[in-house]
Amino acid sequence: MPELPEVETIVRGLSKLLIGKIFLSIDFDNPKSFPNNLVDVNKFLIGSKIGTVKRRGKVIIINLTNGYSLIVHLKMTGQLIYRSNQQSFGGGHPTDSLIGNLPDKSTRVTIDFTDSSKLFFNDQRKFGWMRLLPTIEIENIDFFKKLGPEPLESNFSWQKLYSRLVKRSKSPIKSVLLDQGILAGIGNIYADESLWMTKIHPATKVNKLSKSEIKNLYNNIRTVLNLSIDKGGSTDRNYLNAEGEKGSYLKFANVFRRQGQPCMRCGETIIKFKLNGRGTHICPNEQRLVE
């Protein structure tokens, strides 16, 4: 599943292309991928105009100017691909569909706009979905009600991070960072990177961390996420950015997938182990477990 930087990269790319587009028609092959009432689709989606493209956690939100929104969750193998006579852009699982003729066997939803451009939602494994909702109701559905705050929002402070982490004070810090109810959008890559930068062992319990360490962790989470967005995401082998180019963050990663290589700071060999079922990368010299 993509992490925050990968989804943000797709959103920024599509924002340049979709604003002002008017829906002409919708075609879909699987109700699981497009679980919407057709009466609502015809009344509120067809003929509507796109106002903004945003992100909440790992979800893409296409806001319409009529008070409705189309919510897109790519899940593991989803793609959003825009095509017009002049441009072709896509983001998501890197298959030939990003550059091939569409629709194809993985296309679940085809959206036609009035200017003859199209937006395709492809999903090989059929786990992703597009849902039409009144914009005002988005924050009230269970999926969004459970999401924690956005780590890059201007009003998200280290004190707010601290107050959320201590809700799971006896849990390993990495497990808490991966909890989308605590903090939205962070996955395995950026948890490992942020903890390495802060010199915290991922298995350290939250109640063993000082406020100073949590403040440093807060700063490093934001640094890592912003750097990855600047580099177009990591792809984690599964994601391309909105221009169909692989993200480059992993070229700059300090610890993730660098097992067997020297630590960038001290030269100790990076190791990988399992923590609650997740592959975890650390420098054993600089990230010592606090019991």
Image (cartoon, rainbow, N blue to C red):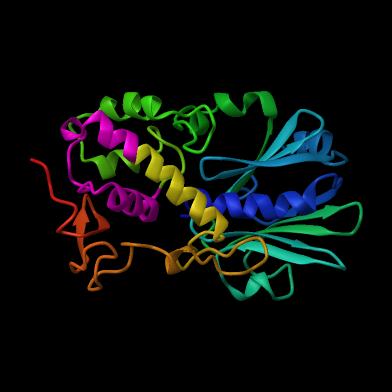
Q: Is residue 158 shown above or below 228?
A: above
- Residue positioned 85% across, 59% down in the render: 117
Magenta region, main secondary structure? helix
Q: Is residue 73 left or right of residue 224?
A: right
Q: What stretch is highlighted in magenta?
A: 187-216
Give residue 165's position: percent from left, percent from top. 30, 30
Q: Which of 52 and 105 is in front in this view?
A: 52
Give residue 59's position: percent from left, percent from top. 56, 44
Rendered-image quadrant of the C terminus: top left
Q: Can residue 199 be seen in this view?
A: yes
Q: Is residue 5 left or right of residue 106?
A: left
- Residue positioned 13% across, 50% down in the render: 288
Give residue 156's position: percent from left, percent from top. 47, 29
Give residue 46's position: percent from left, percent from top. 84, 41
Q: Which residue lies furthest to the front in this view?
A: 266
Q: Nearer the viewer, residue 236 or 266?
A: 266
In the rendered image, residue 272 lying in the magenta stretch gets the answer: no
Q: How many marks?
A: 0
In the rendered image, residue 203 lying in the magenta stretch gets the answer: yes
- Residue positioned 53% across, 33% down in the render: 153
- Residue positioned 66% across, 70% down in the render: 98
Q: Is residue 179 visible?
A: no
Q: In this view, does 158 lie to the left or right of 247?
A: left
Q: Which residue lies furthest to the right in this view?
A: 115
Q: Is residue 215 shown above or below 11?
A: above
Q: Nearer the viewer, residue 215 or 107?
A: 215
Q: Is residue 97 shown above or below 122?
A: below
Q: Is residue 79 left or right of residue 69?
A: left
